[in-house]
Image (cartoon, grey):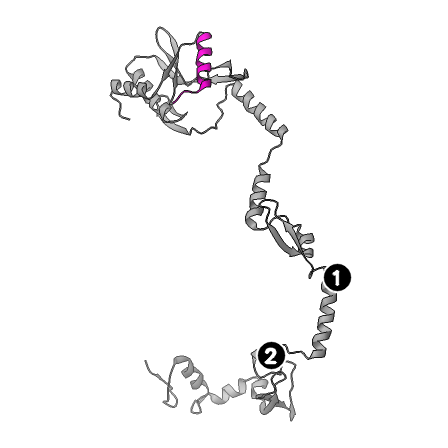
């Protein structure tokens, strides 16, 4: 697209250049009105001045405005030939000496120039810092990583009293019938004949499906994921609570099922105590679950 002035017919490179030209084109009939509307500062005459740069002592040009036959000298008038020269700081020996004396006095009073060392409380690494920073920030750690680790570990650190208190509360809640979450086995949600329940581990999920099918076939009256428990003594003669897994009711009897992957020493103590107290307890291992699933035609 061509950019041609409608007043003089001269072609320009861009539309922005054309718009600036057309306003002040000599053949523009409205040029006199534009001149009248100009501010006073733009209509002032200018004078070319040669100045010497304060930094590098080279010559450069500036233009000063003239008002009432006097040159207007502002505080913002350029003193250097370029921005690079304006940003440099070249001191004489006397000037640099006075600056050094002033700065060194303040540094000594603030202990900024004095270096010291401290040892990180997490990794034990020796770290160099200034005395002022050590006092101001109370530095204890060599890095953000160590600082974060310290804050995280301190945040969850319990005293012996708090540990004993938490232990007592958890045991009391467990004794009163509440299921306490925890341990390595995950809690899983499973759909049963009585709605959704949460059980621990895949073996208990499979047992739920088996018992549902047995109830449908009327082999049992009903079953529940029970809160029934007994007290027993562990190998250290400490009193513990044993929570049964499943409670099954039939026409003739009530019995309990415990699902197990592998047996520990404490498990034998629990089961023996349950039998002593007159409870009927059946332990189902992996082979027992597979046998029941084959019998009931259940897919795993």
Question: Seen in the image, is 154 located left or right of residue 93?
Answer: left
Residue beneath disc 2: 86
Quarter of the image with the C terminus is top left
Residue 68 visible: no
The 10 Å Cα crowd at callout 1, few under 14, some 14 to 19, many 20 or more, is few
Residue sitting at x 30%, y 16%:
214
Quarter of the image with the N terminus is bottom left
Q: Which region of the structure is painted magenta? A: 262-277
Could you say where residue 229 lies in the image, as x and y percent from the top left?
A: 48, 15
Could you say where residue 107 lies in the image, as x and y percent from the top left?
A: 71, 63
Residue beneath disc 1: 109
Quadrant of residue 219 in the image? top left
Could you say where residue 241 lies in the image, as x and y percent from the top left?
A: 50, 17
The residues bearing labels 1 and 2 have C-alpha atoms spaced at a distance of 33 Å
Question: Seen in the image, is 220 located left or right of residue 139?
Answer: left
Q: Which mark sits nearer the N-terminus, 1 or 2?
A: 2
Residue sitting at x 39%, y 29%:
188
Q: Is residue 162 above or below residue 125?
A: above
Q: Is residue 217 above or below residue 41?
A: above
Q: Nearer the viewer, mark 1 or mark 2?
A: 1
């Amino acid at each position: 697209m061509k950019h041609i002035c409608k007043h003089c017919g001269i072609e320009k490179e861009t539309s922005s250049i054309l718009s600036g030209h057309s306003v002040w084109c000599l053949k523009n009939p409205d040029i006199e009105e534009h001149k009248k509307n100009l501010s006073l500062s733009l209509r002032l005459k200018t004078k070319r001045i040669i100045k010497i740069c304060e930094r590098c002592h080279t010559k450069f040009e500036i233009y000063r405005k003239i008002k009432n036959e006097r040159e207007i000298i502002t505080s913002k008038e350029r003193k250097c030939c370029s921005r690079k020269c304006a940003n440099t700081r070249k001191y004489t020996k006397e000037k640099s000496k006075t600056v050094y004396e002033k700065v060194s006095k303040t540094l000594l009073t603030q202990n900024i120039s004095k270096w010291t060392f401290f040892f990180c409380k997490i990794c034990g690494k020796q770290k160099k810092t200034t005395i002022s920073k050590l006092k101001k920030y109370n530095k204890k750690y060599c890095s953000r990583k160590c600082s974060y680790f310290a804050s995280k570990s301190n945040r969850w650190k319990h005293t012996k009293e708090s540990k004993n208190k938490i232990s007592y509360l958890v045991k009391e809640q467990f004794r009163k019938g509440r299921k306490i979450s925890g341990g390595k086995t995950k809690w899983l949600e499973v759909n049963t004949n009585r709605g959704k329940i949460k059980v621990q581990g895949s073996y208990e999920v499979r047992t739920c499906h088996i018992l549902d099918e047995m109830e449908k076939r009327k082999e049992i009256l009903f079953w529940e994921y029970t809160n029934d428990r007994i007290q027993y003594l562990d190998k250290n003669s400490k009193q513990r609570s044993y929570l049964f897994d499943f409670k099954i009711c039939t026409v003739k009897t009530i019995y309990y099922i415990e699902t197990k992957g592998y047996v520990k020493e404490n498990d034998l103590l629990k089961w023996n105590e349950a039998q002593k107290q007159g409870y009927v307890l059946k332990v189902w291992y992996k082979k027992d679950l597979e046998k029941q699933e084959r019998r009931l035609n259940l897919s795993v």
